Image (tube, rainbow, N blue to C red):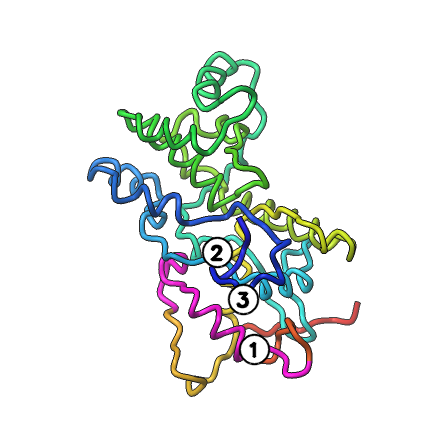
Amino acid sequence: MSLGLGDKKNCDVEHFKTRFSVHRIRELAPTFTDTQREWIHDAGVGALLSMSAFSVPVKLVQWIMKHIDPLLSEFRLKNKVFVIDRPLVCKILELQNGTRPLNLFPDPENMEAVMPIRDQYKEGDRAKLKKCIEVLKASKDRESFIRSFMLLALGTVYCPGTSNDVSMEYVNSLIDTSELQTYDWAGHIIEVLMDEVKKYQNFSPARLQQDHQMGSCLPILAIAYMDHLDIPVDRGSHHINYDLPRICNVSNKDFMFVMEVDKSRLQPNVYGKLPIPDKYLLLVLPL
């Protein structure tokens, strides 16, 4: 799918594509039983049930990525700096985060437990999102349901890839879903996001004129940037709702408003007009 605000005005950025979508889970959420919803909340990912219906402002995200230092996970523009860190990601996504690194490589001793789980999501050599949703709908026990729900969340919201699949590397950390909150999901999401930023920064001008699929949770960049801006209260009639978790309160109107008041008056698709409040400013030393 193309990344944009859902209208034809974004046809000039149609080469920028992503699998990020809140809509698959939003469509499924009303079908869950009270017990299943309770399982999701107990797993620490209940915010996914109340996500706003929004997409990503492509032009703003593209501009932000040009000003990200992926090594430091920092946005830098002159003297304006903010860090994409774990607390920020947890506020946006309302993750109950732990400290254990994700286990992305199967332990040979656990292969007998891992392989049957992987196989139920596969159609041929791939584990497609459609199949994951089928397994989720058919799940009767908590373990299978939460595992399938997390794989769907990772494949559409937290860490979507560039194909219409769910990644089986996460199964190794979802064998025992009672340990889900012990893992450093926020740290992993940041790592995947910065890898995508680095990939985008390395695209040649010619490559940018061709279709390019982008993975990761790109809205984090737009929401973080928006939330760090010092927006005068008298700018227009729109007022941003900053309630947490942000993923449940952000809207396309918020993005459109920010893009309007923060855009350059001289250059198209360039932002950065508004300041960042003093409480966010850091001293930037010459490189």
- Mark 1 or mark 3, which is nearer the start of the sequence? 3
Q: Is residue 158 left or right of residue 134?
A: right
Identify the residue at the far top of this view: 112
Q: Secondary structure at mark 1?
A: helix
Instruction: Inspect the image, locate mark 1, and give the three-letter code of the amino acid beneath it.
Output: Asp
Q: Which residue is mark 3?
A: 9
Q: Is residue 236 above or below residue 31?
A: below
180 or 203: nearer the viewer: 203
Q: Which residue is mark 2?
A: 87
Residue 92 percent location from the top left of the image: 44, 57
Task: Determine the CA span between mark 2 and mark 1.
Answer: 25 Å
Q: Which residue is mark 1?
A: 262
98 or 49: nearer the viewer: 49
Q: Are marks 3 and 2 in contact (CB under 8 Å)?
A: no
Foreground tag (3 vs 2)? 3
Q: Secondary structure at mark 2?
A: helix
Q: Is residue 150 left or right of residue 82?
A: left
